[in-house]
């Protein structure tokens, strides 16, 4: 099996089961050498905890990139998630442009919003800056809220396929080569994921679990990236990532004390079996 080297750029939330603390183990379980570039270090994530610390690592980024350049380090995929500042987005774009091997796959999860709202630390200037990064994505991985912000469309709780098509086309017009859109629900008991690739729309519908869980976007994007880089096609990777994420939520939903993330570790063996 070919051994792939992936760089993932997102924050370290020391507690909270999101970003790098889920991306690193999931990508490793998918047999990928996983290199990290932390965008910021927080004591916890920002959704539901108060008084968290935040150390912005923007100024370290160009120095780290220069060192890697000197060492001739290159990556087979670069996968980005939650970033720390607007200035940082330009550095991340530069890394995307210069640090890839030939055929490097650029995967952008514009982790900035959910349920119709931006995450606490972000504003519309951040959205504008994130659009620049999304333009260079081979695969853009937004949820519906993020897609609406990026495409300047009104966020809706209920919609039809025509609305989703408009969103997808706007994201492609913006410059993304393909889109994997999560949380697409056409009826109340089901949700699903749309893969939009070469102007072709494919939909995988799966079980909807009533209670939304924090960090599932990061679990999904990491499982998708690991599966796709392991050689599966985009739709198969999108399905496996969805089934794994559902399993993680099922493992967690009976434990009300575990409100801040999902117990993704106890489902890793399922993911390993699914990618075999
Ligand atoms: O899961 C997305 C995420 C990642 N990192 C931090 C967050 C969030 C969502 O709120 O706060 C720091």
Image: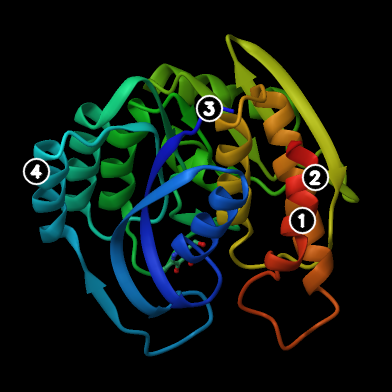
In this rendering, is residue 43 above or below 85? below
Q: Earlier in the sequence, mark 4 or mark 2?
A: 4
User: Distance from label 2 to label 1 (Cα)?
Assistant: 6 Å
x, y (%) of residue 133?
31, 35
Give the labeled residue for mark 4: 66
Seen in the image, is 98 located left or right of residue 49?
Answer: left
Seen in the image, is 68 located left or right of residue 245?
Answer: left
Callouts 4 and 2 close, C-beta under 8 Å: no
User: Distance from label 3 to label 1 (Cα)?
Assistant: 21 Å
Callouts 2 and 1 close, C-beta under 8 Å: yes
User: Distance from label 4 to label 2 (Cα)?
Assistant: 39 Å
Give the labeled residue for mark 1: 269
Q: Name the residue at 46% across, 18% down.
A: 177
x, y (%) of residue 21?
49, 66
Q: Is mark 1 within 8 Å of ligand 1?
A: no
Tag of residue 273: 2
- SS of the residue at dot 3? loop
Give the labeled residue for mark 3: 2
| Location of residue 254 by image quarter | bottom right
User: Distance from label 4 to label 3 (Cα)?
Assistant: 27 Å
x, y (%) of residue 184?
72, 40
In this rendering, is residue 121 above or below 178? below
Q: Name the residue at 62% across, 35% down.
A: 181
How would you rate the neighbour count of disc 3 (Cα within 10 Å): few for under 14, some for 14-19, many for 20 or more?
few
User: Distance from label 2 to label 3 (Cα)?
Assistant: 18 Å
Seen in the image, is 218 located left or right of residue 75?
Answer: right
User: Which callout, 2 or 3, points to the residue nearer the camera?
Assistant: 3
- SS of the residue at dot 2? helix
């Amino acid at each position: 099996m070919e051994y792939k080297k992936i760089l993932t750029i997102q924050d370290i939330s020391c507690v909270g089961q999101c970003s790098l603390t889920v991306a690193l183990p999931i990508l490793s379980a998918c047999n990928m050498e996983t290199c990290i570039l932390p965008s910021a270090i927080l004591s916890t994530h920002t959704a539901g905890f108060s008084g968290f610390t935040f150390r912005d690592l923007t100024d370290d980024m160009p120095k780290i990139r220069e060192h890697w350049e000197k060492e001739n380090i290159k990556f087979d995929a670069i996968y980005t998630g939650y970033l720390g500042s607007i200035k940082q987005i330009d550095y991340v774009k530069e890394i995307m442009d210069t640090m890839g091997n030939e055929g490097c796959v650029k995967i952008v999860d514009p982790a900035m919003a959910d349920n119709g709202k931006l995450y606490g630390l972000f504003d519309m200037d951040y959205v504008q800056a994130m659009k620049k990064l999304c333009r260079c994505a081979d695969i853009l991985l937004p949820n519906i809220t993020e897609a609406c912000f990026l495409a300047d469309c009104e966020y809706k709780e209920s919609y039809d396929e025509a609305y989703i098509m408009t969103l997808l086309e706007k994201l492609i017009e913006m410059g993304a080569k393909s889109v994997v859109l999560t949380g697409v629900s056409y009826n109340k008991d089901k949700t699903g994921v749309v893969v939009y690739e070469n102007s072709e729309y494919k939909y995988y519908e799966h079980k909807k679990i009533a209670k939304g869980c924090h960090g599932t976007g990061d679990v999904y994007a990491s499982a998708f990236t690991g599966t796709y880089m392991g050689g599966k096609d985009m739709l198969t990777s999108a399905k496996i990532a969805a089934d794994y994420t559902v399993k993680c939520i099922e493992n967690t939903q009976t434990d009300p004390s575990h409100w801040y993330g999902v117990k993704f570790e106890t489902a890793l063996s399922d993911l390993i079996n699914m990618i075999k």
